Amino acid sequence: MEEQHSRFEELFLPQLDAAYNLARILVKRDQDAQDVVQDAYIRALKGFKRFRGGNPRAWILTIVRNTAYSWLKKQHPGSTDIVPFNEAIHHTPIEESTSEGLYEERGRLLNEALNRLSVEHREILVLRDIEGWSYKQLASALNVPIGTIMSRLSRARQCLREEIAKIQHKESQNEV
Amino acid sequence: MKCEEVHRLLDIHLDGELDFARRLELEQHLAVCSSCPSLIEEHCEFRTFFAANVITYEAPPRLEARVRAALHQEQAKERFSLFLQPWIYATAIVVVAAFVALNILFPGAEDHLSQQAVLLHSNSLSTEHLVDVASPDPKIVKPWLTARLDFAPPVVGSPASGYSLVGGRIDVIQNRSVATLVYKNDTDDEDVVTLFCWPPKKDRLSDTDHSVEGYRVSTWSTGQCNYILVSKLNNKAMDEFLDSFRVQIQSGAYY
């Protein structure tokens, strides 16, 4: 049992940054993210018998993701934390800029926009674009068909661009 | 492939998840289309921008210690969780109750024998019918018993100092005839000792020494014979009696 426990720590404690990052993006607040990570690790320890080798990072992130969803459900019963978004796919041009100051400004906009997306869109963007998961991995972890992964990713990216544009628009109006 | 389909497949293509056939079609379209290549380029730029600017959070330094502590606590809890399960206690109570009930309803074979022996002993005292063949001499007692039994019981004449053979009789314990030998304290008529013996089949008695209904009951077996000895409680002389008797049987010092 001791041996199993130390093997668990060896495999999963190095994934703490990735686990925290995912939790933080899903539940947004630092303290909540820490609670979710702690919960997820305990769930993982309890279910460690079901871990059949494979990728420990993907395994723990799937548990973090499920724990975050339970947490969100408990915090906001009835709501799934989905910010309404435009279903129509239309292209939002992004203005070219070479100015460094403007680039940093766009970095801030990006993270603010990401934060405004629905939890499903935040999740899929982290797992695909930060963690680099394949569609197959995503489909299996999120328990949806690959077709849904494709459309959800495409919509998430679209929404992200739209949100950036919206914030930009609002801020430019405020300046006026 | 039309522009609309390229728009639809754009992300899948850039994620490297488009199947080979459609990737070929898409590339063929890009080679001839005037608007799609710039769209692709724009998407690529956005991805680069996203990768360079998206905040990835690092776990706060105290989180690892916190998680470790929680894991250790959980491990300790798991180790003792068996004892926290109410069913463990419920099961224990049921098992104990069943054990007690079985012992009351169906006392063990030896308990049952002991009770029969005590009953025979106390009956013989109360009816003042101790023996059917009265003699301190094993040479008289043994043939009398052997003639009425299907075995020849070992008869010890003077098992311990201060005790003498009164004689013998036949009793029935658990549907079989047994040899009963009675000894009496030379200076105390009340101090009567009854010894039951019979050859065991598979039912070898184990060594026990306990009190049953106000009497001391000792059981043992030599393999040739099962013995039950019933005597008064709290009689220190009986320890010596028992030791001496068993030694005599073992060493063949009997008739």
Image (spheres, coloured by chain):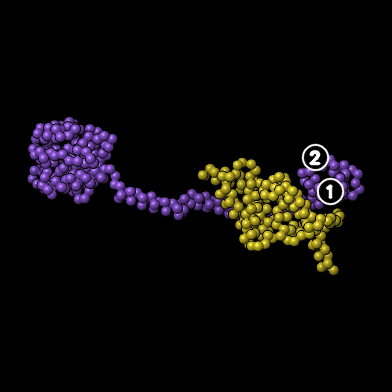
Chain colours: A yellow, B purple
Number of residues whose C-alpha sits closer than 10 Å to that of mark 2, classed few (under 14), some (14–19) or many (20 or more): few
The amino acid type found where label 1 is placed reads Glu
* Residue under pointer 1: B5
Q: Mark 2 near mark 1, Cβ–Cβ under 8 Å?
A: no
Left or right, A128 with respect to B98, comes to right
Report the chain holding disc 2.
B
Q: Measured from the top left, where is residue A90 in percent x and y?
A: 83, 56
The answer to whether tags 2 and 1 share a subunit is yes
Q: Choose the circle earlier in sequence order: 2 or 1.
A: 1
Residue drawn at 15 percent across, 39 percent down: B170
Kindly state the secondary structure of the residue where label 2 is placed: helix
Residue drawn at 45 percent across, 54 percent down: B86
Q: Measured from the top left, where is residue A159 in percent x and y?
A: 78, 57
Looking at the image, which is closer to me, A152 or B60?
Answer: A152
| Viewer can see residue B36 | yes
* Residue under pointer 2: B20
The amino acid type found where label 2 is placed reads Phe
Looking at the image, which is closer to me, B51 or B79?
Answer: B79
Q: Is residue B113 above or below residue A176?
A: above
Q: Measured from the top left, where is residue B35 in percent x and y?
A: 90, 49
Residue drawn at 71 percent across, 45 percent down: A136
Q: Measured from the top left, where is residue B240 in percent x and y?
A: 17, 41
